[in-house]
Image (cartoon, helix red, strand yellow):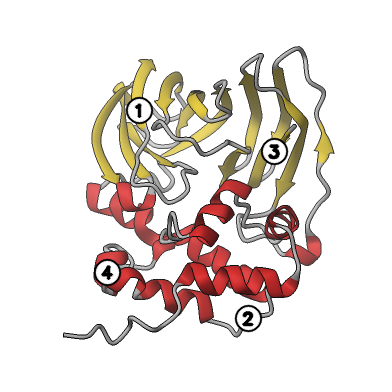
């Protein structure tokens, strides 16, 4: 039996031809995608162009919309190609996408777990510290939180983690360190996503404050890291973002940025600001933080 799709161009072939036609380097494409609010690494773009991996996760689909615009391709050209890539059906390629929209996966999981946090608990302070290994990949992330109970009886909150891993089927792991323990865990390798229920030692009384700490171990990958991002849906008294680089893998530049949301308008993109390196460390501290998305971004030598 003859495969009716055998003569059709593959996603990698169409992408590679479009890149050549536009005469853009992968670095220039990466820079334009970053400005559009959907950053990916040069390695990921190279994998897509060579056919070593496919952009199948939710964030990648949003990236393809911008990529089609950058490469002057008709809207939907790249997205339609990966929906039947390598003979796989849409359900096989997007096992969660066919059930619920990609951006709602984590929200759906939280609802199914019954972790009702609306108006029950708020974050007062957040400290994130990422370690980057000699291979330039993220290894761990230590998160310290100060939480405040807005209602008596509050004892849990969700943690959502998604790894930048070039569309590999991997998931990060979470370990409680202080003031909490890990409850139920849902992993979605197809989206590099882990959703955890974090439990406090006891139910809190309204207005009570508690300090917690947990450690994230990112799955091994050859994908170079390039950012630390923290979404803050509510005002915070304090946010601290830090990166510890391996002495043999120091970045050429580290910058900090703040956006209104993950879908921040490109036309109103705020400028990034350089961050001073102290030996192999970089950090930014912000007080009286308004809702938004805050982060550190780094480029490699």
Q: Which residue is mark 2?
A: 73
Give the mark nearest the N terminus, 1 or 4.
Answer: 4
Residue 32 drawn above or below residue 9? above
At horizontal 69% and vertical 79% (from top left) the residue drawn is: 72
> CB atoms at circles 4 and 3 under 8 Å apart?
no
Give the mark nearest the N terminus, 3 or 1.
Answer: 1
Q: Which residue is mark 3?
A: 297
Question: Local crowd at mark 2 within 10 Å, few (<14), some, or many (≥20)?
Answer: some
Q: Is residue 11 visible?
A: yes
Residue 175, given in percent of the width and then of the height, sits at: 34, 22
At horizontal 35% and vertical 39% (from top left) the residue drawn is: 171
> Quick one: SS at disc 4?
loop
For this rendering, which residue is in front, 16 or 148?
A: 16
Q: Is residue 22 left or right of residue 48?
A: right
Residue 262 drawn above or below residue 87? above
Residue 280, given in percent of the width and then of the height, sits at: 70, 15
How far apart, in angstroms, are the residues tagged by discs 3 and 2? 29 Å
Question: Local crowd at mark 3 within 10 Å, few (<14), some, or many (≥20)?
Answer: many
Residue 95 drawn above or below residue 207? below
> CB atoms at circles 1 and 4 under 8 Å apart?
no
How far apart, in angstroms, are the residues tagged by discs 2 and 4? 28 Å
At horizontal 57% and vertical 47% (from top left) the residue drawn is: 43
Q: Is residue 185 left or right of residue 232?
A: left
The label nearer to you, 2 versus 4, is 2
User: Residue 174, labelled with which disc?
Assistant: 1
Residue 98, given in percent of the width and then of the height, sits at: 29, 71
């Amino acid at each position: 039996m003859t495969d009716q799709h055998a003569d059709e161009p593959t996603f990698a072939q169409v992408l590679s031809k479009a890149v050549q036609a536009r005469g853009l380097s992968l670095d220039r494409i990466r820079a334009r995608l970053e400005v559009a609010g959907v950053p990916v690494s040069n390695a990921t773009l190279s994998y897509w162009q060579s056919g070593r991996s496919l952009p199948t996760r939710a964030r990648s689909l949003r990236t393809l919309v911008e990529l089609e615009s950058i490469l002057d391709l008709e809207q939907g050209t790249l997205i339609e190609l990966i929906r039947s890539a390598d003979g796989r059906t849409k359900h096989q390629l997007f096992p969660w996408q066919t059930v619920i929209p990609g951006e709602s996966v984590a929200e759906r999981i939280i609802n199914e777990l019954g972790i009702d946090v609306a108006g029950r608990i708020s974050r007062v302070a957040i400290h994130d510290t990422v370690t980057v290994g000699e291979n330039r990949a993220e290894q761990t992330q230590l998160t310290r939180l100060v939480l405040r109970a807005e209602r008596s009886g509050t004892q849990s909150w969700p943690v959502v983690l998604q790894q930048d891993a070039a569309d590999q089927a991997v998931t990060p792991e979470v370990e409680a360190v202080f003031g909490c323990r890990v409850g139920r865990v849902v992993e979605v390798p197809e989206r590099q996503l882990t959703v955890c229920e974090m439990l406090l030692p006891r139910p809190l009384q309204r207005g009570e404050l508690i300090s917690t700490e947990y450690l994230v171990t990112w799955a091994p990958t050859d994908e170079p890291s390039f950012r630390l991002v923290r979404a803050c849906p509510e005002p915070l008294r304090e946010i601290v973002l830090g990166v510890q680089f391996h002495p043999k893998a120091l970045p050429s530049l580290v910058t900090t940025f703040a956006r209104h949301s993950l879908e921040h308008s490109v036309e109103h993109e705020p400028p990034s600001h350089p961050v001073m390196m102290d030996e192999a460390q970089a950090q930014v501290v912000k007080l009286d933080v308004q809702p938004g998305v805050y982060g550190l971004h780094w480029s490699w030598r």
